[in-house]
């Protein structure tokens, strides 16, 4: 990974697994991003409503709840986002079937490249 790939990019990271969230935050921060973490559906919705982000990374399953309400809000606000998921290709993403997805597990460079592509960073 090249440092600074996401310099100044404001990222909303919605991930319910604490270790995954902390690791991903560190990867994104090392790339220059400013990261806000939400670990539950409700906190993700609040964060997406309260602040402007350049891009968002949404885990599809948040403690048994779908992150689709956050995706709906981000889409309505025209904020680019992507899903990271352990679900297979048959998973349903509602009106967001064409949104970028990164299959877990993914590498650090894959994550950075995917974010740069959707955020046009």
Image: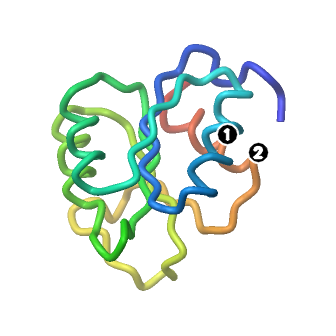
Are dots 2 and 1 in contact, CB under 8 Å? yes
Question: Callout 1: helix, strand or loop?
Answer: helix
> Considering the numbered disc 2 on the image, is that residue within a helix, a strand or a loop?
helix
Q: Is residue 111 above or below residue 25?
A: below
In the rendered view, tell whether residue 93 sits above or below residue 4.
Answer: below
Determine whether 3 is above or below 114 in the image: above
In front: 6, or 99? 6
Task: Indicate whether 112 appears above or below 60.
Answer: above
Say which quarter of the image contains residue 33: top right
Q: Residue at x 37, y 66 (%)?
A: 62
Q: Residue furthest top?
A: 8
Q: What residue does disc 1 label?
A: 112
Disc number for residue 37: none
Q: How busy is the neighbourhood of tag 2: few (under 14 within 10 Å), some, or many (20 plus)?
A: few
Identify the residue at image location x=69%, y=37%. 26
* Residue identifier under label 2: 109
Q: Position of residue 88 (x, y in %)?
A: 51, 82
Q: Residue at x 33, y 56 (%)?
A: 40
């Amino acid at each position: 990974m090249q440092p600074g790939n996401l310099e100044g990019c404001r990222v909303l990271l919605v991930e319910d697994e604490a270790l995954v969230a902390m690791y991903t935050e560190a990867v994104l921060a090392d790339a220059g991003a400013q990261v806000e973490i939400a670990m539950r559906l409700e906190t993700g919705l609040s964060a997406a409503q309260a602040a402007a982000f350049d891009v968002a990374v949404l885990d599809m399953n948040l403690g048994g709840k779908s992150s689709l309400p956050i995706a709906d809000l981000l889409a309505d606000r025209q904020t680019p986002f992507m899903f990271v998921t352990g679900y297979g290709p048959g998973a349903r993403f509602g009106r967001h079937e064409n949104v970028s997805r990164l299959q877990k597990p993914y590498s650090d460079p894959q994550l950075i490249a995917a974010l740069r592509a959707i955020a046009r960073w």
